[in-house]
Amino acid sequence: MKQAQDASGQSVDAPKETLNPFEIAQMLIYNATRELGLPMAVYEYLKEPERILTVSIPVRLESGEVRSFIGYRAQHSDVIGPCKGGVRFHPDVSLDEVKALSMWMTFKCAVLGLPFGGGKGGVICNPADLTRRDLENLSRGYIRALAGFVGPDRDIPAPDVNTNPQVMGWMMDEYSKMKGYNTPGLITGKPMILGGSAGRGAATGRGAVICIREAARRMGLPLRGATAAIQGFGNVGSHTAMLLDELGVKVVAIVDARGGAYNPNGIHVPEAVEFYTQNGTVTGMSHTETIDTTTLFGLDVDILVPAALENQINMANVDAVKAKIVAEAANGPTTPEAARVLTERGVLQIPDILCNAGGVTVSYFEWVQNIQNYYWPEEEVNQKLEQMMVNAFNAVYKVMDQRHVSMRRAAYMVAIKRLSDAMGARGWI
């Protein structure tokens, strides 16, 4: 039986793999705090969100039925600035998941040096069961319930799983009506006509590809002709695929929620995007064979990009992973136990709090533009994103090199050192 440590440092039996995202986040905070030799007060401040709100949202559906949905918003830490984080609509949303995601957002912002803390929200629902009008009413009901809890200087929501610019537009409109004036800075990821930022749609995927490029350069891996497999083909996965394709990477496999496609000679990515848009899946594309996630993770590729949900690479499938680089475009896609196995095998893992931070970085740009009421062209947005992602990658890689730790541990060390410095400056520790 494996041995692990609890928060006090004592050995305890660990009979099964850790899958609870909240417990995983706490463990990563604890380990990095100890590694840095920081006061345990830092861990005590960071181990739980500062505030959590649970709301009931009654919605009269187009069918005439009234249904009450449960929603959450967690604000993890505002030690560096207002909280920031997405809102997901999904049947599996849970309080522990939202708490963990808010914590990851804090570290993501700290790794990039953004003046934000972490927030996250979610509503337990299946958007596929709702009409467009139902979805609008739910979105407006959610932000009404949170109106006293969020705001441009307090907590700024954004899109996440199953939410999009239109949902953000509805929420911004509802909040503005309540305030009596236009408040574009409430929310990011909005339609551009309402104050959204150029480059926001591709930002998470673009940030992931910048990290992959930097990792490949350090490994001496030429990207032109390298192979990649991508799990998840929503906004993040599709943009990652397109940008890798532009760099000459051969995307050989894509898996979405309904199936997958594989071609050892490379998938034509623009065709895959068009096919997915029309059919909701890449399964059935010409010149491809159907595969599933299990097969995709076992492919002999240079780059594996999990861009779906948490705990996808775990002890049940980690031995099959053959990639040289695992780029975590999703939040928490690798369990701690599986991550240790990959590290021992020399696989370079670009952790989620660095790899997928491009989205929150351009959300920060959007917030700044809203406050200034001055908007930047996409080329400028992309240049600023490039600079911040490269600087963050270099900072994490340097700690990894100096401390002889995994890139994941190094990223948490960079983030928690910055948070600790802010706590010290405020007189908390």
Image (cartoon, helix red, strand yellow):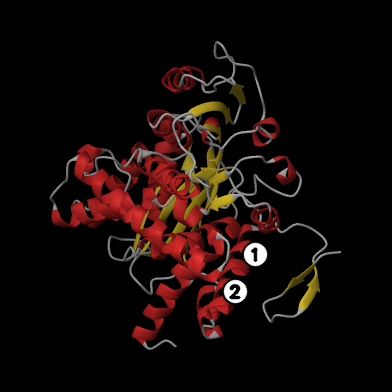
Q: Residue 255, image x and y in percent?
A: 59, 29
How many neighbours does mark 2 have within 10 angstroms: few (below 14), some (14-19), or many (20 or more)?
many
Q: Which residue is mark 2?
A: 30
- Judged from the image, the secondary structure of the residue bearing numbered disc 1 is helix
Reply above or below: 146 against 211. below
Q: Locate residue 88 relative to residue 158 in the image: left or right.
A: right
Q: Quadrant of the N terminus?
A: bottom right
* Residue 375 appears left or right of 28: left
Kind of element beneath mark 2: helix
At a point 61% along the width and 26% down the height, the residue shown is: 258
Q: Residue furthest right?
A: 1
Mark nearest the camera among 2 and 1 is 2
Q: Earlier in the sequence, mark 2 or mark 1?
A: 1
**Residue 377, image x and y in percent?**
17, 41
Whole-percent x, y for residue 232 in the image: 54, 35
**Amino acid at circle 2:** Tyr
Would residue 353 be visible to someone looking at this image?
Answer: yes
